[in-house]
Amino acid sequence: AWVTYGLGSVADNLPAYMTMTDGGFRAGPAERGVRFIQLFNNDWDGHAEGAANHQANAVRTDQPTAALLADLQQRGLLESTLVVWAGEFGRTPVMQGANGRDHSPYGCSVWLTGGGVRGGQTIGATDELGFRVVEN
């Protein structure tokens, strides 16, 4: 299971998120009826070296998140478990300094799966530059 969740991979330098997904789910709280489980990776603040920061964080979170979703699906729990992937803000569409982007309260990406959510929907939109909300 650890390899499935990413331990032993290039992401080994930050096993905390992987440990939370594997230990947090495989220990069985969703199977025991726990109503809310929060997993987090609090290192996305890419004001400087934004591309490197976000790429490293994607490596640390993509595989364990995919493994968690696969586990939920395999165990028959995904349809009754709402998974929300979100941050507390978006990023501006322009550079901050040489390599980063500032916080944007006007638009961000969130995805949902499971819990009866109908897939393939886009809700809301920003202007063509991504600065302001123009829909919803």
Image: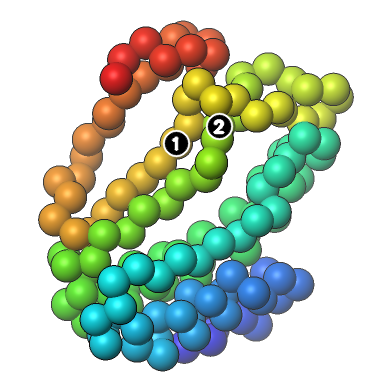
| Circle 2 crowding by C-alpha within 10 Å: few under 14, some 14–19, many from 20 | some
Marks 2 and 1 sit apart, C-alpha to C-alpha, by 7 Å
Amino acid type at circle 1 is Ser
Tag of residue 90: 2
The image shows residue 119 at horizontal and vertical percentages of 20, 45
Measured as percent of width and height from the top left, residue 45 is found at: 71, 43
Q: Regarding mark 1 in the picture, which secondary structure is present there?
A: loop
Marks 2 and 1, the one that precedes in the sequence: 2
Q: On screen, 91 above or below 75? A: above
- Tell me, what colour scheme is on the image? rainbow
Left or right, residue 77 beside residue 109:
left
Q: How many numbered dots are placed on residues in this image?
A: 2
Q: Which mark is residue 80?
A: none
Q: Check the image and report above or below for 127 versus 28.
A: above
Instruction: Name the secondary structure under disc 2.
Output: strand
Q: Position of residue 12 (x, y in %)?
A: 70, 75
**Depth check, front residue: 59 or 45:** 45
Residue at which label 1 appears? 109
Q: Nearer the viewer, residue 24 or 1?
A: 24
What's the amino acid at mark 2? Gly
Q: Residue at x 54, y 13 (%)?
A: 131
Residue at point 68%, 17% (across, down): 94
Front one among 112 and 73: 112
Q: Position of residue 29 (x, y in %)?
A: 35, 83
| Residue sticking out furthest to the front | 35
47 relative to 81 in the view: left or right: right
Q: Are marks 2 and 1 in contact (CB under 8 Å)?
A: yes
Residue displayed at 27% across by 28% down: 123
How packed is label 1: few (under 14 Cα within 10 Å), some, or many (20 or more)? few
92 displayed left or right of 83: right
